[in-house]
Image (cartoon, helix red, strand yellow):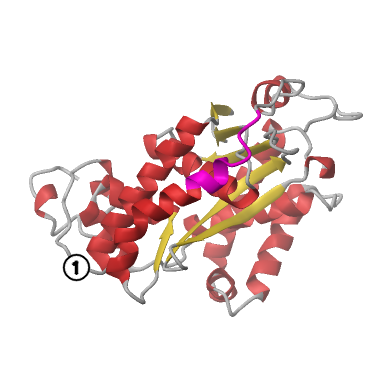
Amino acid sequence: MVDAVEAAVLTPTQERVLSDLMGSGQARPTFDADLASRLRADLEERLAPVATRLGERQLVVHKSALSRVHTCEGHHVAEAKAGFSWSAPAAVGVVAHKAIELSVSLAPPDGLAALVDLAIERIASDVDRGLGAWLAGASELDRAEVRSGAIDRALKFEDEFPPIKRAWRPRLESTLLTSLCGDRIVVRGKVDLALGQAHGTTAGVLIVDFKTGKPRRDHTDDLRFYALLETLRAGVPPFRVASWYLDSGQCHPEDVDEALLQAAARRLVDGARKLCELEIARRPPILSAGPVCHYCSARHTCPETADRAL
């Protein structure tokens, strides 16, 4: 997947990305040709009771919903009720990823800062979409916060990753989608960065999720979820998934095997069942106190947080 980066002097961190994360020169695993079809058949069999309960309705399962419902069902219900609204912190990642995507094809003399400005301009021009509408009406202060945060992330990416070559087949903000049980259950995700391509039944794709802050258990679960969706889409798993922490220049990689995919499938089935029970059957949520209590929409009324100092 990775050739030598021509005429580039790489930092030790960039060299580590090539050798340890991308696995330059390392052998790739080969998987059974029927792996994806077996995973799909197993998912549909185990999700059949959920599909029956849905009737003609459709359940959409995405990364955030899975993470929330497995962390605390009450948190998921509260956040679903509150709804998503754009803010400067929420916009930073999208703008940074767009700037990095543009950097694969464009090389302006002013560098990534100019591409961040271009990314903001392009996103804001699409006023019919959520982030575009928010940026178009954002205050000067909010726009400045988005620009500053996006430049910080984009420059850290540039410092820590070798220049991305088109030959690596980069996909940024790439949507993965699969439909199960006659389209009654739709599963979707969006990966920050995917590089490479499978060859026959030999894996060749690396999936990277960029993070700020500290590592969390759900980061690993998110990546396994992406690996499952990529397997169902392409018919061959990625060879590796990794969380890359931009603030520290560290990564948590995990090589993909069938056991990992089976674990991701079990988590998906369990999460879809919970989501169906909560959203369709209106089962009362099970409350689980934890770190999410600090920013949950229901933190001031939830009985689990009544005795916690938030």
Q: Position of residue 84 (x, y in %)?
A: 40, 66
Residue plotted at (66% across, 64% down):
120
Q: Position of residue 181 (x, y in %)?
A: 43, 63
Q: Quadrant of the N terminus?
A: top right
Q: Position of residue 264 (x, y in %)?
A: 43, 41
Which corner quadrant of the image does residue 237 belong to? Answer: top right
Q: Secondary structure at mark 1?
A: loop
Label 1 amino acid? Arg
Q: Position of residue 220 (x, y in %)?
A: 45, 36
Q: Is residue 190 left or right of residue 19?
A: left
User: Can residue 78 be seen in the rendering of this structure?
Assistant: no
From which residue to which does the magenta span run?
30-39
User: Can residue 272 be seen in the rendering of this structure?
Assistant: yes
Q: Which residue is denoted by mark 1 in the rendering? A: 282
Q: Magenta span has 144?
A: no
In the rendered view, would you say 89 is above or below 137? above
Q: Residue furthest bottom?
A: 128
